[in-house]
Structure formats: C-alpha cells, structure tokens
Amino acid sequence: MSTISMKAVTALRAYADAMPTAINRLKDSNTKLMTVFQSVRENIGPHDDDIFDALAAVQKFVIDSAEPIQGLKPMMEAKADDIQAYIDLQFGGNP
C-alpha cells in the first residue's frame, strides 16, 4: 500500500532543488580533475592515454546528461504541486 503525504511533497521539492547544484558540482569537479590530470600527464607513465580516455568519457557523460537532468526539476516541482493539490483537496491540507 502506498501513502501520499506532505512528507513526499517536501522530499520531492528538496530533491528537485538539489539536482542543479549536484550537477554543477559534478561538472566543476570533473573540470578540475581534467586540469590536474593534464598538469601531471607526462609523469603518469604508459597508461596515460587510457586514463585520459576514461576521464574524457566521464566528462562527456556529465555534459550530455546535465541538460536532461536539469529538465527534471520543473517536472518534479509540477508533480509536487499536483500531489499537494490532491492532499489539499482530500484532506484540507492536513493528511
């Protein structure tokens, strides 16, 4: 059995608010990692190309996924609004 509550609304809104910050931090961290790698690349040894390829794949994933993930925020906020409207209608805002 599932329940609907204001806790769900609050959690959904908090998650929606946190997503853009998390994505931006991930992008910033990956950029820093690439910069550090480039500065020490000549000292890494025979696997520097493999490491670079792995870092580049992560960077591509972060960039490619950032926009769709950012697009989830308004959808999650709208769903939270729908849930809250339902709660207000059914329970007068007091589930």
Image (tube, helix red, strand yellow):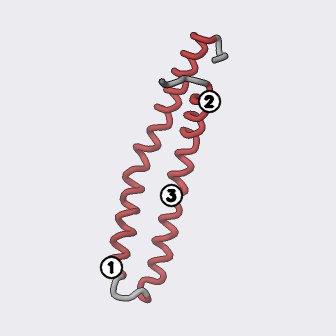
Relative image position of residue 47 (x, y in whole percent)? 34, 83
Against 32, residue 60 (above or below) is: above
Relative image position of residue 20 (x, y in whole percent)? 53, 46
Q: Quick check: marks 3 and 2 in contact, CB under 8 Å?
A: no
Q: Which amino acid does label 1 sit on?
A: Asp
Real-space Cα separation, disc 2 to disc 1, in angstroms: 48 Å
At x 35%, y 64%, the residue is: 57
Q: Quick check: marks 2 and 1 in contact, CB under 8 Å?
A: no
Left or right side of 52 for 9: right
At x 65%, y 16%, the residue is: 93
Q: Name the residue under label 2.
A: 7
* First in residue order: circle 2 vs circle 1: 2
At x 37%, y 74%, the residue is: 52
Q: What residue type is labelled 3?
A: Leu
Q: Mark 3 points at which residue?
A: 26
Q: Which amino acid does label 2 sit on?
A: Lys
**Which of 6/30 is in front?**
6
Real-space Cα separation, disc 3 to disc 2, in angstroms: 28 Å
Around disc 3, counting alpha carbons within 10 Å, would you say few (fewer than 14), some (14 to 19), or many (20 or more)? some
Around disc 2, counting alpha carbons within 10 Å, would you say few (fewer than 14), some (14 to 19), or many (20 or more)? few
Q: Mark 1 points at which residue?
A: 49
* First in residue order: circle 1 vs circle 3: 3
Question: Which SS class for mark 2?
Answer: helix
- Observer-side mark, 3 or 2, equals 2
Against 63, residue 87 (above or below) is: above
Question: Which SS class for mark 3?
Answer: helix
At x 50%, y 51%, the residue is: 23
Relative image position of residue 6 (x, y in whole percent)? 62, 25
